[in-house]
Image: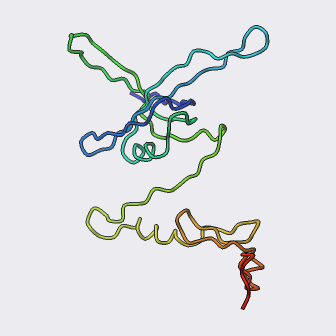
Amino acid sequence: MSDVQVMLYGYVGQDVSLKQAGSVDVASFRVGTTPRIRDGQGGYRNGETVWTSVTCWRHLARNVKESVHVGDPVVVLGRARTERWVAPDGEQRERQFVEATTVCHDLAKGTSVFRKSPRNPRAQDGHTALGAVLDEAEQGPVGIDPVTGEPLYPAGGAERTTGRAGDLESGASGDPDHRAA
């Protein structure tokens, strides 16, 4: 049996709810998708909005809780799921939802700033994990700004200089109040 893959483009309709299922984080929210329908006069009108429940697990759940807010345009990739149960009145019930594997802001509708999640600094066996070593290495410059020639650092890394590359060599700081000694 293969999974049905789903891709949703829409807007977040409620605050992300983060809960625990045992020791695992689970986030849920709803996405509204409104199709544009061509009318008879050559224009367009809004169709009926379809609301879809989305569930995220583990690291994705925590990242979605911190990053996604009501009204944000998002793209959701995941698997179509159906949950079935028997209600207290004895009736069979079911609900469809998407179990997300990826959630991201729709950059066709605006901009976003990416912050990499920190890695777990300790491995399962108590030894320092490779992730901690990589995190430390990432504190150095990640590139050079093509316009100013300045080193670029990851968010939260070393402070960025304010002068141009030529100014650094001549001792100027780029600060108009700076006086060379």
Number of numbered callouts drawn: 0
Query: From the viewer's perspective, is residue 146 above or below residue 41?
Result: below
Is residue 52 left or right of 71 when viewed as pictured?
left
* Residue pictured at 36% horizontal, 23% vertical: 82
* Residue pictured at 38% horizontal, 36% vertical: 17
Q: Which residue lies furthest to the front in this view?
A: 177
User: Which of 161 and 3 lies nearest the eye of the viewer?
Assistant: 161
* Residue pictured at 63% horizontal, 41% vertical: 107
Percent position of residue 120, x then y: 36, 61
Is residue 62 left or right of 162 when viewed as pictured?
left
Is residue 47 left or right of 166 when viewed as pictured?
left
Q: In which quadrant will I find the C terminus?
A: bottom right
Percent position of residue 92, x then y: 27, 12
Place residue 18 in its image quadrant: top left
Query: From the viewer's perspective, is residue 138 above or below residue 107?
Result: below
User: Which of 78 and 32 lies nearest the eye of the viewer?
Assistant: 32
* Residue pictured at 26% horizontal, 46% vertical: 23
Query: From the viewer's perspective, is residue 123 above or below residue 24?
Result: below
Place residue 55 in its image quadrant: top left
What colouring does the structure picture have?
A: rainbow
Q: Residue furthest bottom?
A: 181
Is residue 74 left or right of 27 when viewed as pictured?
right
Percent position of residue 41, x then y: 79, 9
Percent position of residue 1, x then y: 38, 27
